[in-house]
Amino acid sequence: MKNTQPTTADLERQLKRRSKAAKLEVWGRVVSFSALILIVAVVVAIIGFVASKGIATFTTNHVNLWDFLTGKDWNPGIKDAHGKPEVGALSMIVGSFLITILSALIATPFAIGTAVFMNEISPNRGAKILQPVTELLVGIPSVVYGFIGLSVVVPFTRNVFGGSGFGILSGTCVLFVMILPTVTSMSADALRSVPRYYREASLALGATQWQTIWKVVLRAATPGLMTAVVFGMARAFGEALAVQMVIGNAALMPHTLVDPAATLTSVLTTGIGNTVMGSLQNNALWSLALVLLLMSLVFNLIVRLIGRKGRLH
Amino acid sequence: MFVNNDVSKQDMEERHIVQPHDPDHPVVLSTEDLHVYYGKSEALYEGDLKFAQNQITALIGPSGSGKSTFLRSLNRMNDRIATVTGKIMYRGVDVNQPDVDVYEMRRRIGMVFQRPNPFAKSIYDNIAFALRLRGVTAKKDLDEKVERSLRQAALWDQVKDELTKSALALSGGQAQRLCIARAIALRPDILLLDEPASALDPVSTSQLEDTLLKLKEHYTIIIVTHNMQQAARISEYTAFFNQGRVLEYDTTSHIFTNPRVQVTSDYVSGNFG
Amino acid sequence: MLKAKLQNKIAIGALYGVAGIVVLILVALLGYILVSGMPQLSWHFLTAPAKAFLKGGGVGVQLFNSFYLLILAMLISFPIALGAAIYLYEYAKDNWVTSVVRTAIEILSSLPSVVVGLFGFLFFVVKLKLGFSILSGAFALTFFNLPLLTRNIEDSLHTISENQREGGLALGLSRWETVNKIILPAAVPSILTGVILSAGRVFGEAAALIYTAGQSAPALNFADWNPFNISSPLNPMRPAETLAVHIWKINSEGIMPDAKAISSGSSAVLVIAILLFNLAARYLGKRLYKRLTSA
Ligand SMILES: Nc1ncnc2c1ncn2[C@@H]1O[C@H](COP(=O)(O)OP(=O)(O)OP(=O)(O)O)[C@@H](O)[C@H]1O
Ligand SMILES: [Mg+2]
């Protein structure tokens, strides 16, 4: 049977009618775009709300930004000799940076070493055992890390160094173990993306396996490895409960690693429920949240810069 | 023998285009002054071809000469990736106009691709689901249309007992014929095929050719192929593309026995390169 | 040459050592959680309500809350993430708007969960007056979950070959129909894997919840399934401490006499749940993929 064809005029009408598919397409675009816009709106709202609350300390309560960033005394309820509220966040900022940097310093060699082992030295065992285990551990809730810190690390520090056991050292240990799986697993991804022929070429030139790893594989994977470490640091910096459980929550400048200290997150989690909305005590806490948010933007920026550098190579 | 691969002035002057003019097979599709640009670079310069109804037209030419670009422009599959200017006259309507509904148009001008691309559905659903979306819902209707399409694509006898099996389990040749069945289930007017046999073994290829020869009773077929014998075996008309231009267009027998343009002659005799 | 060989030996030995230590730490960690927690597990522990000042309470209510919040959060976040992923992967042009949107999503994924929780507190609990409630918690978890889930779904869309899309378009389907009827069904195994893995993350989240879903678990009447009744488990306006929040809460308050045992048990439950999520994701993904590709 031949297809019977409409006249040209009919055909033109049929072809220029908006079909169901065309209508569905518009609908689909609108629906999916709305979902996307919703996410963007959430991000904007979070940044906007936290920023407006966090800035109130400086605008409504007239706290000096410099005093906030460099002051060592944190007692938002109390006024100092000059009648100014004591809202120096330095001890917490230092605490946050200290545990972040220390835990990243310890975790990095272990994580990259393990990733190299998984990927270069024993790929079989790596793929079968190490990879699934690290991936599982990435998903372990941070309160569990906190609880183990509380029941294992803190008593251990107490017995060895005396004191309460709470402090930067315990926090660092907990964060080290917590970010280890994340950094390991991301480092392994970075190594995996180095093309196989890089290694083959190097080995064919007579380089030993270690020389190949050191000079070729690690070098090629550097941007990815740096990203992994920065991600680990971002996670450590923003971690709240696990740190709060073991650091002692004393907003004092840390003089040793084994005295109780505080981080931005730990003061936030303990404080926000005990202050009245709109009070200086409360606003000061929101300023800490704003610092936290800004730092996470900074980490984000660093990751982007690394990514851009990596692409140039 | 040395052949200059560039389209020289001479080639352009030699250009030999004879459009089909057979009263039994009127022209259903034609392009007028068609240009295609990928970004700034022009991939097709003024393709002017007419296609005769219920005939097979083969598009041949070296790699990168613009055959796929041309073919994909015909049912506007290139809309998102290229700029296409000029007219595409389909039965008197210029379908290269923004107010033409591309979805409606593609139902009339169907397409089959180089790599068989059955959907991750049962054999039955591969064919039935587009019909359902277009309002065919009665089970009896669907069954009948699925069977007819599969028969026309010469696949029915092989799969009639396993219609619920996943289409991804079919062999390459079967999968390609399923894709043809899927395309013709919508009863298109024209069928565009881009190297449909290049991923198939010789037996499947020859089965596919038989299928196409039968299909031309119902459809107008335009096929891109790299296989000279295939073009010679199945097509009535052949267009030779080179460097984004149609250098020669004529009946297939003319192109293969008596090409007028030197490059065409080199190409069909295998001396090209 | 000799030096290089020696160096090679030492370095590789050191790598064995490093990997060994890491394995030891990870195994000790998992071992500690399971060994100290498993003995606490019993039917009573998993179903009984908690006791604040006495020994022998359970985590029944908290466990239920965790699952209820998880399901609600997933129900809210999945459609949004799906829509966003479809737009980003199937429609978005490569221009500055897209790159701004992608940046926004990345920022959301890197925000500390405590910040997300504080925003939830400010917006839902205080501004919208939802109070410490399941609903506030579910929204906070949604924000926390959206970026990861969107990314997962986008990756899943990426695994489906471009020629499937062309196949759909060539049949005269719109891109929307093509995605919904061809691409998504084919991507179900991988989307499901992503959903379950992100569910694991949501299940253990606590920081985003302490100031949104709250830190108390009023007794529930498991015979009353009318969501409008105050003691009904389904009531979305009641405060709902989850298992993860419970661990934090009893450890920072220190008034429950057997807090340590309860925490061990709860930790084990969390870790086992995550493990099951992981296994389920792998298993279901593979199973569904097989179903899709065979008879
Ligand atoms: N998506 C695209 N973007 C940019 N340029 C393209 C694209 N597709 C094709 N081209 C270019 O257009 C020209 C024609 O390509 P086309 O695919 O049409 O050739 P072809 O004749 O089909 O070749 P083949 O026989 O290899 O399939 C080539 O130079 C090619 O590089
Ligand atoms: Mg081609």
Image (tube, coloured by chain):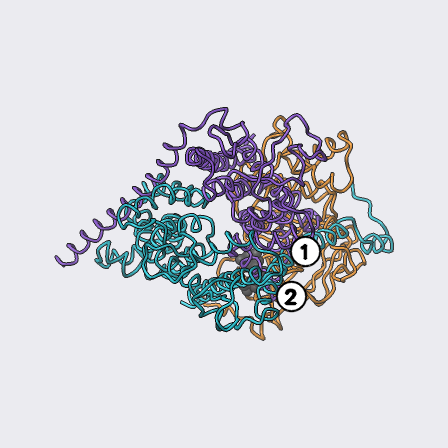
Chain colours: A cyan, B orange, C purple
Quadrant for ligand 1? bottom right
Expressed as whole percent of the image width and height from the top left, the position of residue A19 reads 79, 50
Label 2, residues with CA under 10 Å away: few <14, some 14-19, many ≥20: many
The disc label shown at residue B76, or none: none
Q: Nearer the viewer, mark 2 or mark 1?
A: 1
Q: Quadrant of the C terminus of chain C?
A: top right
Q: Quadrant of the N terminus of chain C?
A: bottom left
Q: Residue at x 22, y 50 (%)?
A: C14
Seen as rendered, the residue at the extreme left is C2
Subunit ID for the residue under disc 1 = A
Closer to us: B24 or C292: C292
Res. A125 visible in picture: yes
Q: Residue at x 69, y 38 (%)?
A: B129
Subunit ID for the residue under disc 2 = B
Q: Secondary structure at mark 2?
A: strand
Expressed as whole percent of the image width and height from the top left, the position of residue C214 reads 58, 44
> Is the residue at mark 1 in contact range of ligand 1, meaning its CB lies under 8 Å from it?
no
Q: Mark 2 highlights which residue?
A: B36
Q: From the viewer's perspective, tell me whether residue C35 is left or right of residue C145.
A: left
Expressed as whole percent of the image width and height from the top left, the position of residue A130 reads 35, 42
The amino acid at mark 2 is Val
> Is the residue at mark 2 in contact range of ligand 1, meaning its CB lies under 8 Å from it?
yes
Name the image quarter holding residue A51: bottom right
Depicted A47 relative to depicted C221: above or below? below
The amino acid at mark 1 is Phe
The disc label shown at residue A33, or none: 1
Closer to us: B59 or C28: C28
Closer to us: C261 or C258: C258
Depicted C83 relative to depicted C285: above or below? below
CA–CA distance between discs 2 and 1? Answer: 30 Å
